[in-house]
Image (cartoon, rainbow, N blue to C red):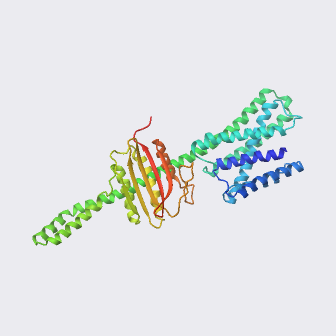
Amino acid sequence: MIYVVDNLFNYLIYLFIIHFGFRIYPRKNRLLVGASVVTVLLAGAFNAYYDVNSPMVYILWSVLSILLFFEERFGYLIILSASIMYFTGIIDTFSVMLIQVVMIGRGMTGTNIAWWMEPAYLLSFLIYFFVYRQILKKQEVYLRDIGFKYKLALLVQGSIFQMFYNLVFVSFNENHTAYGWDAYAVFFISITGAIYSVFLTLSLAVKNVLSGRQNRELQSFMYMQKQQYDYQLQQSVAVRRLKHDLVNHIGVLRELLNEKKTEEAKEYIDTIWNMQNEFDLKIHTGDSFLDIIVNYYSYLAAKEKVEFTVSGRLTKKIRLEMFDLTTLVGNILQNALEAALKADVPKIHMELIEHTKELFIVVLNSTEEAVTVVKGKPFLATSKRDKRNHGFGMKNIAAAVQKYHGECYMESVEENGERLFKISVAIPREEKV
C-alpha cells in the first residue's frame, strides 16, 4: 500500500508544479486524463505486488502520466517531466533528512524509514506551495518564463547539495554515537540553508524576467511614441511647405481674379482648402494628448482601408499620465487594428462615455472569428506563436488599469451578423485614497 500512496503523492506534486508553476493546462479529453491516473495506480500496484520501487517503473509512469495529462508538445513534456522527477527527488531527500534530524535526533539505526516518507511529501509540497505563492504568483512570473540557464542552475545546484548531504548523512548514520545535539542542529540548519539558496536562485531568475519585461514595455512605449512623433512631424513638414508656397498661391489667385477667371479661382481655393484640411486633426476627443493617439490610429486605419469611427467627447482632461495613456489606449487600438485587418469587413469603433465618477473607454473591432473569453480570466493570452516575446499588450493594458484602480471587461458580441470583440475600460474620475 505504501507504494500506491507514494505514487499518488508524487503524482499530485507533479500536477501542482506543472499546472501552477509552469502554467500548462490539462487536456480537455477526459479519457486521456483518466488514463493518466490509471497509469499511476497500475505502477503503484506493480511495485506493491513485487515489493520493489523500480527506478524504471518510476520513470515510465512519471513521464507517461504527464504526457497523458497535459496539453503540450510531447518533446517538451518529456524533458519537463524528467527534470521535475529529478528535482522533486532532491527536495524530497532534503525533506526526509530534515524530518530524520528533528524526529530521530541521535541516529536512525533499527528504525523503519517508510513512515517518514508521507510527512516528507507534505513538507516538500509546502516548500513548492510557498515558492508558488511568494515568488511566482506574487510576481506573475512562472517557471516556463525563466531562462534555461536558471533552470539548469537549479538542477545542478540541487544535485551538488544532494550528493554532499547524502555523504554527510551516511557518515552521521554510521557514527551517530560520536556526535552530540549540536552536530544535528548544524546539519538541520545547513539543509535549511541549501533549500534557501534554491529560493535565492529562483528569485534572481524571476527578477531577471521582470527586468526583461520592463525593458520590453519601455521599448514598446518608445516605439509608439516614435510612430506618433513621426506622424506629427510629417504633418508639420507638410504645413511648412504649404506656408512656404502660400505667397505663390496668392499670386496665382490674384492673376486669376485680374483675368476675371472666377470659376478657376474658386477651384484653386478649394484645392488649397482641401490641402489644409489634411493637416488638421480630424478627430477631437476633448483631450489634446488623446487626440494625437486616436488620430494616429485613424491615419493607420485609413491607410489599411479600415473603417475607424469615434463617438463621444470629453469635457475634462483625462487624469492619466502621458506614459499610461499611451500604453492603455495605444495598445487597445493597436490590438483592435491587428484583429480588424483579418476580418471580412474591417472596422473599429471607439466610444468615450463620461459619468460623474468614471470615464468609460469602449472599443469594438471586427474579428475573423469569435473570440472566447474565459470567465475569471480578465485578459486574453496572445494568439501569436512566439508567446514568450508577445502578449505584453494585454498585460500592459491590465497594469495601466490596475494603477488607476479601474476595471476592464471583454466580451465577444455579434451585431447584424458581424463578429465583434469589445473591450470596455472604466477609469475613476478621482484618485482613490
Q: Position of residue 140 (x, y in %)?
A: 57, 45
Instruction: Identify the residue at horizontal 46%, vertical 51% (top origin).
Output: 424
From the viewer's perspective, is 117 left or right of 125?
Answer: right
From the viewer's perspective, is 318 left or right of 182?
Answer: left
Q: Quadrant of residue 192?
A: top right
322 versus 78 height, above or below: above
Q: How many marks?
A: 0
Instruction: Identify the residue at horizontal 57%, vertical 58% (top origin).
Output: 386
From the viewer's perspective, is 244 left or right of 303?
Answer: left
Instruction: Identify the residue at horizontal 16%, vertical 72% (top origin).
Output: 263
In the picture, the quarter occupied by the C terminus is top left
Q: Position of residue 236 (x, y in %)?
A: 30, 58
Return the residue nearer the eye: 416 or 179. 416
Any part of residue 55 in sight: no
From the viewer's perspective, is 393 left or right of 1?
Answer: left
Q: Position of residue 76 (x, y in %)?
A: 68, 57
123 versus 419 height, above or below: above
425 versus 187 height, above or below: below
Return the residue nearer the eye: 309 or 140. 309
In the picture, the quarter occupied by the N terminus is top right
Return the residue nearer the eye: 422 or 234. 422
Any part of residue 110 in sight: yes
Q: Position of residue 43 (x, y in %)?
A: 82, 52
